[in-house]
Image (cartoon, coloured by chain):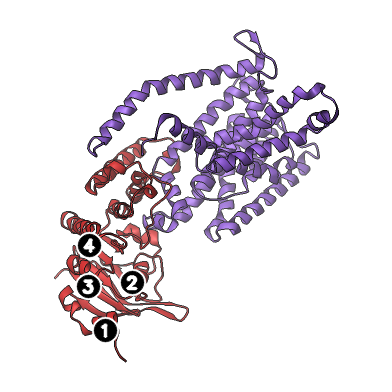
Chain colours: A red, B purple
Amino acid sequence: MTRPLLEIDALHMRFQGIVALDDVSFSLDEGKVTALIGPNGAGKTTMFNCVTGMYRPTDGAIRFAGETITGLKAHRIARHGIARTFQNLALFSGLTVLQNLLVGAYLKGSSGLLQGMFRTGATRTEEAEAEAQAREILAYLGLDDVADAKPSQLPYGQQKRIEFGRALMQKAKLILLDEPMAGMSKTEKAAMTALIQRVRAEMGMTFLIVEHDIPVIMDVSDKIVVLDFGRKIADGDPRAVRSDPAVIAAYLGTDE
Amino acid sequence: MSDTLAPATVAAARAKTSPGKWIVRAIVLAVLIYAPFVLTSRSIFGIPLSNMQLLNLGLTQINLMLIAMLGALSLNFLTGSAGLISIGHAAFYATGAMTAAIFGTQLGWPFPLVLVCAAIAGALAGILAGLPSLRVRGLYFVLSTLAVHYVVVFLFQEYQFAFFGVVGVPFAQPSIGPIAIDSPIRWYFFLLPLVALVYFGLRNVLATREGRALMAMRDHELAATAMGADVRILRLKAFALSSAIAAVAGALYAHLLTNATSEVFGINFAIQFIAMIIIGGLGSLSGSLLGAAVWLLLPTIITGLTSFAADSTGIVRTVLVDHRPQLVQMIFGLIVIVLLIFAPGGMADLIAKLRAALFGRRHG
C-alpha cells in the first residue's frame, strides 16, 4: 500500500468558542477522487481553508507528500503543490479568460516587475511557455473560442470550467474543488464529472471534492468522508457510506 | 461563425489592419515630432497661427503635461492595476525633488545620475509608505499614505529651511553630457521619449507574470494567494516601482521650474493625480495620458476661449473677464462631471465605446 498524499491528523478548528472542526482525521490516496460531504455548516469549507492555509488550525496536523504543512501561509502551501477552486467563483474579473489561466502559471515563472518591464529573454520564454500551456488547457476544456472574453460575459458553467482550468495550470499534485457543480444544469454536471474523471485518468491528479449532489458524488468518487457538526461520522467507499446509519441520520435527522 | 473558424478569422483581421496601424503610428510620431516646432514658431508650414488657433497652448505647458503624465502613469499602475489607493503621490514627487537637490544642487553630480538617485530614493520611500499595507486595508491604508505625505512634506520643509531658506530650493539647468537641456524644445525632446519608455515599460509589466499577479491581487486577493503569489511582497514591489517613477517625475518637475518649495507639494498636488487617473480611466495606462492631458491643458484652453469676450462690457465682462479664473474652474469642473456621468470608466472607456460604435463590436 502506498503512503497517502494528504493526511489530516486529529484536526481541530475553533472560532471563539464555536467548534468548526472537532478531531477530524482522514487521508487521501494518490490519484484518487475523495469527496467531502455533509449538511450545511458541517465544516467542509473550513476543512478546505485549513488545508490550503487560509485558516490556521487550532490543533492537529496536516501532512502533504510526507511534509508537515500545518499552519503555513496560503501561498507557501500552493508552492507545495496544492491548488483549489472556491465555492463562489473567484475569478479575476478584470482579466481575460486567457489571463486568468496565465495567473495560474505564476509559480512556474520567476521574472519580476523589472524583468517584465524590459521583456528580458527569460521573461519572453517563460511567457511563451505559459501561454502555450494555457491555450492547450483552454482547448482541453473547450474554451478556446472565449480566450479573450472577460469571465463575466460568459455563462456560469463556463466560468466554473475556467476556474478549474486555472487550477490545472498550477500543475499541482492535489486539487481541491469546492462545490464544482453548484448551480449547474444536469448536462453541465455530467460534463464536469466526465472532465474530472478524464483529468484524473490522463494527468494522474488527486482530487478532494466538496459537493452537495449525492448521486454525482457516488458516481465520481473513490472514497467519501462525511462530516457533521465538525465531526467525522463516516469514511469509506461510496456504497458503504451510503448505507451507513449515522450518515442517513445526519442527512434526514433522527428522533432524539 | 463556427468555433473552428474563429481563430483564423481573428488572425486574418489582425493581418489586414496591420498596415493601417503602422500608418497611424507613423502619423502620430510625425505629429509628436513636429508639434513643438509649431508651438515654438507659432506657425505651421510657414503659415502663422493665431493664439486661438494654437488653443492658447505653449510648449512649457506641454512639458509640464509630459511630467504630469509620468505621475499619472505611476499612480494608475499603483491604484488602477494593483488596487492600492494612495494620496501619497505628492510625497514621492517631493522625495525626488529633495534627492535631486542633495545630489544635484548641493553635491553637483551629473543630471542623469541624479535622476537614478531620485528613482532609488523614491523606491525606498515607496517601500516605507507601503509597509502599512501589510497590516491595514481600505480607508485605513489611505489614511496611512496621507500620514506619509505630511511626514515627507515636513522633511522637505526642514531641509529647505536648513540649507536654502524661504525662497526655496534652486535647481541648476540640467544637461546630459555636453547637451544642455536649456530650452522648452530640448526639454520636450528629453521628456517625450521618457514618457514613452515609462508607458511601454508599464504596459510590458502588466502583460507579464508579476504585473498580471498584481491585477489578480486587485480582483481577488485570496485567489491570487492560492495561485502562490505572496501578496505582501507584491504590494511593496508595486509601491517601489510606482514611487520610483513618481520621484523621477518630481526631480524633473523641480528642474523644469528651476525652484521648488515645500508648499508646491501640498495635498492638492497629490489629489490632482487621483483626478487625472479617474478622468482618464482607472487601470488604463493610455487613460492616464489622456487624464493628464485634460487636467493640464483644458484650463488653458478654456482661458483662451474666454478671451473672445475681452472687449465686452457690463455683466458679460464681469463674468467672463473679471472672474475668469473662477469661470475657468467652473467650466472645467462641469466638463469633468459630465464626462464622469457619461463615461464612468473614464476617457479610455469612452474612446473604447466610441470605437465599438463606429467600427462594430470589438472582438471578445
Residue denoted by label 2: A44
Pointer 2 indicates a residue of which chain? A
Q: Earlier in the sequence, mark 3 or mark 2?
A: 2
Q: Type of residue at label 2?
A: Lys
Q: Chain of mark 3?
A: A
**Amino acid type indicated by mark 4:** Thr
Q: Are marks 2 and 4 on the same chain?
A: yes
Q: Position of residue B47 (x, y in %)?
A: 64, 8
Q: Which residue is mark 4?
A: A206
Contact (CB < 8 A) between labels 4 and 1? no
Residue drawn at 25 percent across, 47 percent down: A137
Q: Position of residue A139 (x, y in %)?
A: 23, 44
Depth check, mark 4 against mark 1: the one in front is 1
Q: Nearer the viewer, residue A70 or A247?
A: A247
The residue to which callout 1 is attached is A249
Report which residue position mark 3 lands on.
A224
Residue A161 visible in the displayed image: yes
Q: Is residue B190 left or right of residue B331?
A: left
Q: Quadrant of residue A199?
A: bottom left
